[in-house]
Amino acid sequence: MQLSLSVNINDLLHTDKTNLFERWAARPRVFSSGSMQDTFTQLKQAGIQGMELVVVERTTDADIAAVLAIVEQYKMPVLSIHMPLVKTFSLGLKDIAVLVRFAQRLSAKLLILHCPAIFKKTNDKDFIGSIKQYEDIYKVKVVIENMEKSVVTFYEKNYWKEPYFSGMCKQMGFAINLDVCHLVQSGGNEETFLKDNIQYIAGIHLSDSGVGFWAKQHLALGDGEIPMISFLQDVRNRNYKGVITLEIRGDVESILSSARMVQNIFV
Protein backbone atom coordinates (compact mmCIF):
# COMPACT_ATOMS: atom_id res chain seq x y z
CA MET A 1 0.00 0.00 0.00
CA GLN A 2 1.14 3.53 -0.80
CA LEU A 3 -0.31 6.45 1.16
CA SER A 4 -0.97 9.58 -0.87
CA LEU A 5 -2.47 13.02 -0.37
CA SER A 6 -4.85 14.81 -2.72
CA VAL A 7 -3.23 18.14 -3.69
CA ASN A 8 -4.70 20.74 -6.02
CA ILE A 9 -2.21 22.02 -8.58
CA ASN A 10 -3.09 25.64 -7.79
CA ASP A 11 -2.23 25.05 -4.14
CA LEU A 12 1.09 23.47 -5.04
CA LEU A 13 2.09 26.20 -7.52
CA HIS A 14 0.45 29.12 -5.68
CA THR A 15 -1.55 30.00 -8.77
CA ASP A 16 -5.24 30.67 -9.32
CA LYS A 17 -6.29 29.24 -12.68
CA THR A 18 -9.74 28.29 -11.46
CA ASN A 19 -13.36 29.12 -11.91
CA LEU A 20 -15.62 29.52 -8.86
CA PHE A 21 -16.48 25.80 -8.63
CA GLU A 22 -12.87 24.67 -8.87
CA ARG A 23 -11.86 27.23 -6.24
CA TRP A 24 -14.49 25.87 -3.83
CA ALA A 25 -13.53 22.24 -4.50
CA ALA A 26 -9.81 22.95 -3.96
CA ARG A 27 -10.22 23.62 -0.23
CA PRO A 28 -8.07 23.50 1.85
CA ARG A 29 -4.75 24.88 0.64
CA VAL A 30 -2.15 22.67 2.29
CA PHE A 31 0.76 24.79 1.03
CA SER A 32 -0.79 28.21 1.65
CA SER A 33 1.29 29.00 4.73
CA GLY A 34 4.73 28.04 5.96
CA SER A 35 7.60 26.82 3.84
CA MET A 36 7.11 24.08 1.29
CA GLN A 37 10.08 22.25 2.78
CA ASP A 38 8.50 22.20 6.24
CA THR A 39 5.15 21.05 4.87
CA PHE A 40 6.64 18.19 2.88
CA THR A 41 8.75 17.16 5.88
CA GLN A 42 5.63 17.00 8.07
CA LEU A 43 3.76 14.97 5.47
CA LYS A 44 6.61 12.49 5.08
CA GLN A 45 6.99 12.09 8.84
CA ALA A 46 3.28 11.25 9.07
CA GLY A 47 3.75 8.51 6.47
CA ILE A 48 2.55 10.19 3.27
CA GLN A 49 4.56 8.82 0.36
CA GLY A 50 3.20 10.71 -2.62
CA MET A 51 0.54 12.98 -4.07
CA GLU A 52 -2.57 12.75 -6.18
CA LEU A 53 -2.39 15.87 -8.33
CA VAL A 54 -5.80 17.41 -9.04
CA VAL A 55 -5.41 19.40 -12.25
CA VAL A 56 -7.76 22.14 -13.42
CA GLU A 57 -9.20 22.87 -16.83
CA ARG A 58 -6.53 25.50 -17.58
CA THR A 59 -3.50 23.41 -16.51
CA THR A 60 -0.69 23.73 -19.05
CA ASP A 61 2.49 21.88 -19.96
CA ALA A 62 4.41 24.66 -18.22
CA ASP A 63 2.45 23.99 -15.02
CA ILE A 64 3.31 20.30 -15.22
CA ALA A 65 6.99 21.18 -15.71
CA ALA A 66 6.81 23.32 -12.57
CA VAL A 67 5.23 20.43 -10.64
CA LEU A 68 7.97 18.12 -11.87
CA ALA A 69 10.60 20.50 -10.51
CA ILE A 70 8.90 20.41 -7.10
CA VAL A 71 8.65 16.61 -7.21
CA GLU A 72 12.36 16.32 -7.93
CA GLN A 73 13.40 18.91 -5.35
CA TYR A 74 11.34 17.57 -2.44
CA LYS A 75 11.34 13.87 -3.37
CA MET A 76 7.56 13.59 -3.19
CA PRO A 77 6.30 11.72 -6.27
CA VAL A 78 2.97 12.14 -8.02
CA LEU A 79 1.29 8.73 -7.80
CA SER A 80 -1.91 9.68 -9.62
CA ILE A 81 -3.53 12.45 -11.64
CA HIS A 82 -7.13 13.48 -10.97
CA MET A 83 -9.23 14.93 -13.78
CA PRO A 84 -10.45 18.55 -13.62
CA LEU A 85 -13.59 18.50 -11.48
CA VAL A 86 -15.35 20.96 -13.74
CA LYS A 87 -15.16 18.43 -16.61
CA THR A 88 -16.98 15.64 -14.75
CA PHE A 89 -19.87 15.56 -17.22
CA SER A 90 -18.10 16.78 -20.34
CA LEU A 91 -14.72 15.06 -20.61
CA GLY A 92 -13.74 14.19 -24.17
CA LEU A 93 -11.03 12.09 -25.77
CA LYS A 94 -8.84 15.14 -26.36
CA ASP A 95 -9.06 15.94 -22.65
CA ILE A 96 -8.13 12.40 -21.70
CA ALA A 97 -5.21 12.43 -24.14
CA VAL A 98 -3.86 15.54 -22.39
CA LEU A 99 -4.33 13.97 -18.95
CA VAL A 100 -2.50 10.73 -19.77
CA ARG A 101 0.33 12.80 -21.22
CA PHE A 102 0.49 14.80 -17.98
CA ALA A 103 0.55 11.54 -16.03
CA GLN A 104 3.37 10.11 -18.14
CA ARG A 105 5.42 13.32 -17.75
CA LEU A 106 5.13 13.04 -13.95
CA SER A 107 5.60 9.23 -13.89
CA ALA A 108 2.14 8.84 -12.35
CA LYS A 109 0.66 5.37 -12.89
CA LEU A 110 -3.02 6.16 -12.31
CA LEU A 111 -5.46 8.59 -13.93
CA ILE A 112 -8.61 9.10 -11.85
CA LEU A 113 -11.78 9.89 -13.81
CA HIS A 114 -15.22 10.53 -12.35
CA CYS A 115 -17.61 7.91 -13.63
CA PRO A 116 -20.02 10.21 -15.55
CA ALA A 117 -17.14 11.12 -17.85
CA ILE A 118 -16.95 7.48 -18.94
CA PHE A 119 -20.39 5.98 -18.28
CA LYS A 120 -22.05 8.52 -20.58
CA LYS A 121 -20.13 6.82 -23.43
CA THR A 122 -20.85 3.20 -22.46
CA ASN A 123 -21.93 2.17 -25.95
CA ASP A 124 -19.28 4.16 -27.82
CA LYS A 125 -16.78 1.41 -28.67
CA ASP A 126 -14.42 3.84 -30.43
CA PHE A 127 -14.31 6.07 -27.33
CA ILE A 128 -13.60 3.17 -24.97
CA GLY A 129 -11.14 1.60 -27.40
CA SER A 130 -9.19 4.85 -27.67
CA ILE A 131 -8.88 5.08 -23.88
CA LYS A 132 -7.56 1.51 -23.80
CA GLN A 133 -4.98 2.51 -26.42
CA TYR A 134 -3.95 5.49 -24.28
CA GLU A 135 -3.44 3.13 -21.34
CA ASP A 136 -1.13 0.96 -23.43
CA ILE A 137 0.81 3.80 -25.07
CA TYR A 138 1.34 5.94 -21.96
CA LYS A 139 1.54 3.09 -19.41
CA VAL A 140 -1.13 4.76 -17.28
CA LYS A 141 -4.08 2.92 -15.76
CA VAL A 142 -7.42 4.72 -16.10
CA VAL A 143 -9.36 4.31 -12.87
CA ILE A 144 -13.05 5.15 -12.43
CA GLU A 145 -14.37 6.83 -9.27
CA ASN A 146 -17.85 6.44 -7.79
CA MET A 147 -19.89 9.60 -7.20
CA GLU A 148 -21.94 10.73 -4.23
CA LYS A 149 -25.73 10.67 -4.30
CA SER A 150 -26.87 14.22 -5.04
CA VAL A 151 -29.54 16.22 -6.80
CA VAL A 152 -27.37 16.00 -9.92
CA THR A 153 -26.75 12.24 -9.82
CA PHE A 154 -29.96 11.03 -8.11
CA TYR A 155 -31.50 9.40 -11.20
CA GLU A 156 -28.19 7.97 -12.48
CA LYS A 157 -27.82 5.02 -10.13
CA ASN A 158 -24.84 3.68 -12.06
CA TYR A 159 -22.88 6.64 -10.69
CA TRP A 160 -23.32 5.84 -6.99
CA LYS A 161 -25.40 2.76 -6.21
CA GLU A 162 -24.09 -0.77 -5.80
CA PRO A 163 -23.79 -3.15 -7.54
CA TYR A 164 -24.51 -0.92 -10.53
CA PHE A 165 -21.36 1.22 -10.31
CA SER A 166 -18.88 -1.63 -9.91
CA GLY A 167 -20.77 -3.67 -12.48
CA MET A 168 -20.35 -0.92 -15.07
CA CYS A 169 -16.60 -0.68 -14.37
CA LYS A 170 -16.20 -4.43 -14.78
CA GLN A 171 -18.32 -4.49 -17.94
CA MET A 172 -16.21 -1.75 -19.52
CA GLY A 173 -12.92 -3.23 -18.31
CA PHE A 174 -11.76 -0.34 -16.13
CA ALA A 175 -10.23 -0.45 -12.65
CA ILE A 176 -12.08 1.12 -9.72
CA ASN A 177 -11.19 4.06 -7.53
CA LEU A 178 -13.30 3.55 -4.42
CA ASP A 179 -14.28 6.82 -2.79
CA VAL A 180 -15.28 5.53 0.65
CA CYS A 181 -16.95 8.75 1.70
CA HIS A 182 -19.10 8.86 -1.46
CA LEU A 183 -20.04 5.20 -1.01
CA VAL A 184 -21.17 5.59 2.61
CA GLN A 185 -22.93 8.91 2.02
CA SER A 186 -25.02 7.27 -0.69
CA GLY A 187 -26.03 4.31 1.47
CA GLY A 188 -23.42 1.74 0.43
CA ASN A 189 -21.48 -0.57 2.71
CA GLU A 190 -17.70 -0.27 2.63
CA GLU A 191 -16.96 -3.83 3.81
CA THR A 192 -19.34 -5.40 1.29
CA PHE A 193 -17.81 -3.31 -1.49
CA LEU A 194 -14.33 -4.49 -0.57
CA LYS A 195 -15.40 -8.13 -0.39
CA ASP A 196 -17.05 -8.00 -3.81
CA ASN A 197 -14.51 -5.85 -5.65
CA ILE A 198 -11.07 -5.92 -4.02
CA GLN A 199 -9.40 -7.43 -7.09
CA TYR A 200 -10.68 -4.55 -9.26
CA ILE A 201 -9.69 -1.68 -6.93
CA ALA A 202 -6.55 0.24 -7.94
CA GLY A 203 -7.15 3.33 -5.82
CA ILE A 204 -9.01 4.35 -2.68
CA HIS A 205 -10.03 7.90 -1.79
CA LEU A 206 -10.16 7.99 1.98
CA SER A 207 -11.99 10.43 4.22
CA ASP A 208 -14.70 10.19 6.83
CA SER A 209 -18.36 11.01 6.26
CA GLY A 210 -21.80 11.12 7.68
CA VAL A 211 -24.57 8.96 6.23
CA GLY A 212 -27.41 10.28 4.12
CA PHE A 213 -28.20 12.73 1.36
CA TRP A 214 -27.08 15.90 3.16
CA ALA A 215 -24.27 14.36 5.20
CA LYS A 216 -20.96 16.16 5.64
CA GLN A 217 -18.21 14.58 3.58
CA HIS A 218 -14.40 14.57 3.27
CA LEU A 219 -13.90 14.81 7.02
CA ALA A 220 -10.74 13.87 8.90
CA LEU A 221 -10.61 10.18 9.81
CA GLY A 222 -12.55 9.62 13.02
CA ASP A 223 -14.75 12.71 12.61
CA GLY A 224 -17.60 10.94 10.80
CA GLU A 225 -19.66 7.78 11.02
CA ILE A 226 -17.50 5.35 9.06
CA PRO A 227 -15.97 2.61 11.26
CA MET A 228 -12.56 3.62 10.00
CA ILE A 229 -10.35 1.32 12.06
CA SER A 230 -12.24 -1.81 11.05
CA PHE A 231 -12.36 -0.66 7.41
CA LEU A 232 -8.61 -0.10 7.27
CA GLN A 233 -7.98 -3.43 8.95
CA ASP A 234 -10.18 -5.07 6.33
CA VAL A 235 -8.21 -3.36 3.53
CA ARG A 236 -4.94 -4.53 5.10
CA ASN A 237 -6.17 -8.07 5.68
CA ARG A 238 -7.21 -8.35 2.03
CA ASN A 239 -3.59 -7.63 1.09
CA TYR A 240 -4.44 -4.46 -0.82
CA LYS A 241 -1.40 -3.24 -2.76
CA GLY A 242 -2.77 -0.11 -4.41
CA VAL A 243 -2.82 3.58 -3.48
CA ILE A 244 -4.80 5.08 -0.60
CA THR A 245 -5.28 8.82 -1.11
CA LEU A 246 -6.36 11.08 1.73
CA GLU A 247 -8.99 13.46 0.35
CA ILE A 248 -9.72 15.58 3.39
CA ARG A 249 -11.11 19.11 3.58
CA GLY A 250 -9.44 20.16 6.79
CA ASP A 251 -6.33 21.81 8.12
CA VAL A 252 -2.85 20.33 7.92
CA GLU A 253 -3.08 18.83 11.39
CA SER A 254 -6.25 16.90 10.48
CA ILE A 255 -4.43 15.51 7.44
CA LEU A 256 -1.41 14.53 9.53
CA SER A 257 -3.51 12.83 12.21
CA SER A 258 -5.44 10.93 9.52
CA ALA A 259 -2.20 9.79 7.89
CA ARG A 260 -0.92 8.53 11.24
CA MET A 261 -4.11 6.55 11.76
CA VAL A 262 -3.62 4.78 8.42
CA GLN A 263 0.02 4.07 9.10
CA ASN A 264 -0.74 2.66 12.55
CA ILE A 265 -2.92 0.03 10.89
CA PHE A 266 -0.57 -0.87 8.06
CA VAL A 267 2.83 -0.70 9.73
Image (cartoon, rainbow, N blue to C red):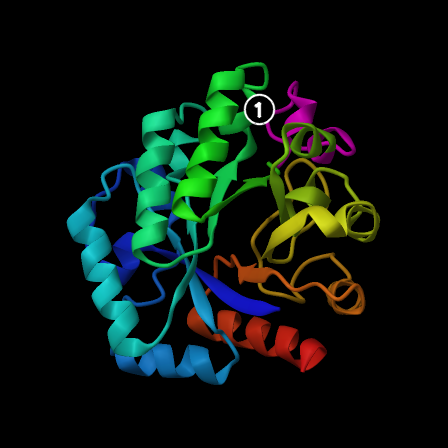
Q: Is residue 66 left or right of residue 125?
A: left
Q: Is residue 236 left or right of residue 125?
A: right
Nearer the observer, 36 or 127 = 127
Q: Is residue 161 magenta?
A: yes
SS at mark 1? helix
**Which amino acid, mark 1?**
Phe
Among the 4 quarters of the image, the one containing residue 168: top right
Span colored in magenta: 148-166
Nearer the observer, 211 or 158 = 158
Magenta part, dominant SS: loop
Residue at horizontal 51 percent and vertical 59 percent from the top: 248
Q: Is residue 259 magenta?
A: no
Q: Which quarter shows the N terminus?
A: bottom right
Residue at horizontal 78 percent and vertical 52 percent from the top: 194
Among the 4 quarters of the image, the one containing residue 67: bottom left
Nearer the observer, 170 or 52 = 170
Among the 4 quarters of the image, the one containing residue 262: bottom right
Give the percent coordinates (x, y) of residue 182. Answer: 64, 43
State whether residue 34 appears in this view. Answer: no
Residue hosting label 1: 119
Give the percent coordinates (x, y) of residue 192. Answer: 84, 48
Q: Is residue 204 left or right of residue 228?
A: left
Q: Which quarter shows the C terminus?
A: bottom right
At label 1, counting other C-alpha atoms closer than 10 Å, the crowd grade (few under 14, some 14-19, many 20 or more) is many
Residue at horizontal 49 percent and vertical 38 percent from the top: 113
